[in-house]
Image: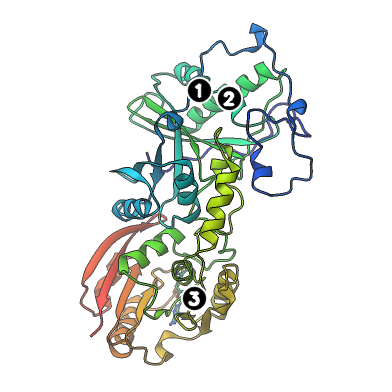
Amino acid sequence: MSNPGKGPGKKRMGGPGRRGGSGVGPRKPSRHAAGKPTGRPPSRPDEQPRRRSDSRYTTNVETVTPIYLQTNTYFAQIAGGLEELGAKELAGLGATNLNIINRGIDFKADRETLYRINYRARLITRVLAPMHKFRAENPEALYLETKRIDWTNIFRLDQTFAVFANLSNSNIDHSHFASLKVKDSVVDMFRKRFRQQRPNVDSDDPDLWISLHMYDNQATLSIDCSGGSLHKRGYRQQAVEAPIQETLAAAILDISGWDGKQKLYDPMCGSGTLLSEAWLKAGNIPAQTLRRKFGFMMLPDYDRRVWVKVKFEEENKIKMVRGGLIRGSDIDPKAVKMTRGNNARLPYGDELIVKTRDFRELPVMENHLIVCNPPYGVRLMKGEDMGAFYKEFGDFLKQKCKGGQAFVYFGDRELIGTIGLKASMKMPIRNGGLDGRLVWYELY
Ligand SMILES: C[S@@+](CC[C@H](N)C(=O)[O-])C[C@H]1O[C@@H](n2cnc3c(N)ncnc32)[C@H](O)[C@@H]1O
C-alpha cells in the first residue's frame, strides 16, 4: 500500500445529517470520547434513528467481520527508504510480527499498542486497520463488496466521511471514480436503513477516513486509524517556503544516532521543524501530543478507557529539555519568530533558544550535532550563487564545528559537490516531491 490518492472534493450531498445525536453501534461517539465539546448533548440509544427490520430496509448482503478484529493486523505507511527505521520504532512501541513491504509495514498489535503507536510514533505517516479484502474486476464488484462492511455500525448520520483511493495495475484505474463508487455504496447503505438520510462527505477533516487500496484487481478497504497523516503534529502553524516534513526531520535525528544528550544546533532553522522534532525526542514527548481526534476512535471496538490509560501513561514520560541542549538560528527574523511560535506549542517549548544570525557570523561550536536543511533552489535564493553559498557553509562546518558531526539534507543533490567536505554517508530520502539526499559529515 502507498499513500492514498485524493478523495472527492468537499461536498454536501443529499439530505442533512440527523442532529442531536444519532449514535449507531455499541460505542460512544468519537467526538465525545475525544473530550472535545460538540455543542450538543451526547447521543443516547433512544435517540438513534430506528432501524427497520423489514427486508426492504436491509442491504441483502451478508456483512463481514473486519479483518483487523480477526487478526489484530494493521498496516503502517511510511516514506520510501525509512521502512527499516519505522519497523524498529514500531517494535519499540510494542508491535509484533513486523513485515516490511515497499513504503509500508504490516504488524500486529493489541488495542493499547495501536493507540500508543498512533500517539507516539514519529516516523510513520498513518496506520490503516484493514476491514475487508476482495477481488474487484469491475465497478459493480467494488460497489457490492463495499456493502459487506456494516458502515452504519461504524459512524453516524451526523458524522462526515471521505474515501481516499490508491490504485495500480487494475481494471479500475481512476482513483476519483473508485472513491466515488465506495462513497455511493456507503451512502446507499445509510439511505436504505435510515429512510433516505445519509452522512455527508468532508475530504478536508472527516470524522471517518476510509482508504481503498487496489493492486492487480485485489482491493483492500481500511479505516485510517490515525485520522489523517501523522506528519501533521499541530505545532507547525507557520512555515517558511520549502519546510522539511516533520516525519523526515524525525528520521534525520534517528539516522544521526542523536542520543538527546549531545548539544544540537540548526544554523538555518527556517520554521524550526528539525528543532521541534529534536524537542519532541529529547523531551520524550508523544509526537501527537497536540492531536485531539484520532481515527482509532471510530473503530467499532474503540475503548475509551484504554485510550485514557495510554494517554496518561505516555504523558507521564514527558520530561524537561535541558537548557541550551537544542538551539538554532536563521538569517531571516520572520523565520526565527515562526520557530519560536511553533515550538512554544510543545510542552516547555517556549524555552527553546533561537536567534537571528547569518551562519557566517556564528561563534565556534565544537562537539555539536549540526542538523540542517539549507536553501536549495532558485525560489529561496534568487540571484545568489548557490555553489559559493554551499562552499561557505562547508567552511563554517570545517572551521567552527570541530569534533562534531553534521547531517545536512540537500533538496538538490547536485549541490553536494559544492560543499567541499568529504561525506561519510549519502542517503536518498524524498521530501515532498524532491529527490533529496541526507549527507553525513564527520568534522575533525
Ligand atoms: C529550506 S529552509 C529551512 C527549512 C526548515 N528546515 C524548516 O523545516 O522550516 C532554509 C533556511 O535557510 C535560511 N538561510 C538562508 N541563508 C542563510 C544564512 N546565510 N544564514 C542563516 N540562515 C540562512 C533561510 O532564511 C531559510 O529559512
Q: Are marks 3 and 2 in contact (CB under 8 Å)?
A: no
Q: Where is mark 2, residue-wise?
A: 186
Amino acid type of the residue that numbered disc 1 sits on in the rendered structure: Thr
Q: CA distance from mark 3 to mark 2?
A: 47 Å
Answer whether labels 1 and 3 touch (C-beta < 8 Å).
no
The residue nearer to you, when weighing 220 against 434, is 220
Residue at screen point 57% across, 69% down: 347
Left or right of 405? Residue 233 is right
Percent across and percent down for residue 395 are 30, 86
- What's the distance in space between the residues labelled 1 and 3, CA to CA? 48 Å
Residue on which the image places disc 1: 146
Q: Which amino acid lies under the numbered mark 3 shown in the image of this protein?
A: Val
At horizontal 77% and vertical 26% (from top left) the residue drawn is: 46
Q: Nearer the viewer, residue 252 or 348?
A: 348
Which residue matches tag 3? 321
Q: Are marks 1 and 2 in contact (CB under 8 Å)?
A: yes
Disc 2 element: helix
- Residue 134 at x, y = what percent? 40, 22
Tell which quarter ligand 1 is in: bottom left
384 and 410: which is toward the camera: 410
- Closer to the chain start, of discs 1 and 3, is 1
Q: Quadrant of the N terminus?
A: top left
- Left or right, 149 with respect to 97, comes to right
Q: Is residue 174 visible?
A: no
Residue 83 or residue 174, whichever sits in front: 83
Give the x, y percent position of residue 266: 42, 77
Residue 429 figure quarter: bottom left
Between circles 1 and 3, the one closer to the viewer is: 3
Position of the C terminus by quadrant: bottom left
Q: Is residue 106 left or right of residue 192?
A: left
Query: In terms of sequence position, does the residue under pointer 3 or pointer 2 come before the other?
Result: 2
